[in-house]
Image (cartoon, rainbow, N blue to C red):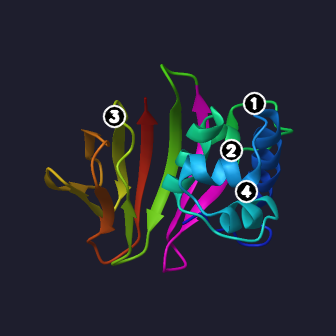
Amino acid sequence: MLHTDQGRSDVLAFVGENLRRLRRQAGLSQAALAQAAGISRRMIINLEGGDTNISLSSLDRLAEALGATFVEIVSDPAAQSRRIEAVTWRGGRADSEAVLLGSVPARSEAQLWRWSLGPGDRYSAEPDPEGWHEMIAVTEGRVLIDLAEGPVVIEAGGYAIYNSAQTYAYVNVGDGVARFIRTTVA
C-alpha cells in the first residue's frame, strides 16, 4: 500500500494533484476512470482528496487507464529532474519502507528504488504487465523473493534478475533489517 508519514513525503498529495490533472486532460469523469482502472469511484474521490492509501498495483492500473506512467502519478509535478525520492510503501514494522529514488525513459519506463524490510516483514505484489523485469541487489540482510516460479533467497552482496509479470513477494528472512536496491524495467 502507498503510505506516507507527515514530514516524510507528500506523495499522496502528489497522487491527488496528478490524478485530478491527468484525468481532466484525458476528459474522463471520476466514474469513467474508476471503471477503466477497475477501481471504485470512492477510491478515486479519496485519492484526489489526498486522504486514502492505495496499492502500488492499483496505481499502475490508474496510470495505464490514463495513458500515463507510474512515475507521472506519484512524482512532484513541480520537480524538474527525474529524482523522486518519495516514500511510496510502508510495511507493518517501522523500519520497512520503499523509496522510489528516480526514473528514466526505457521502452516504457525504468525505476530505481531503495527498500528496507524489518525482520519478518513481507511485501506482496500483484504481477506486473508482460514485459516488465526486476533486478534486486541486497545490500544488508537476507531477502527471500517468493516468485510464482519458485523462491530465491538473496544474501547481502547478492542479486537476482527475474520477470515480474508473475505473483511475487519480498520477505525479510533474517534477524535484522534487510535493505536492497530494486530496479524495474519495461
Regarding mark 4 in the picture, which secondary structure is present there?
helix
Compute the Cα span from label 4 to label 1: 16 Å
Amino acid beneath label 2: Ile
Task: Name the spot of residue 54 as percent of width and height, x first.
Answer: 59, 64
Placement of 15 over or under 52, stated as above or below: above
Q: How crowded is mark 2: few (under 14 residues within 10 Å), some or many (20 or more)?
A: many
Q: Which residue is depicted at the point 43% across and 38% down?
A: 184
How many numbered marks does the figure carry? Answer: 4
Q: Relative to residue 163, is residue 13 depicted above or below?
A: below
Q: Magenta stretch containing residue 17, yes or no? A: no
The residue at which mark 4 appears reads as 11
User: Relative to residue 12, is residue 102 depicted above or below?
Assistant: above
Disc nearer the start of the sequence (2/1): 2
User: Residues under labels 1 and 3: Cα distance?
Assistant: 28 Å
Circle 1 crowding by C-alpha within 10 Å: few under 14, some 14–19, many from 20: few
Q: Nearer the viewer, mark 1 or mark 3?
A: 3
Is-magenta flag for residue 93?
yes
Q: Report the Cα–Cα distance between label 4 and label 3.
A: 27 Å
Quarter containing the N terminus: bottom right
Q: Mark 3 points at which residue?
A: 130
Identify the residue at horizontal 29%, vertical 56% (top origin): 168
- Which residue is label 1 attached to? 81
Dot 4 or dot 1: first in sequence order is: 4
Q: Disc 2 and disc 1: Cα gap in Å?
A: 15 Å
Residue type at the position of mark 4:
Val
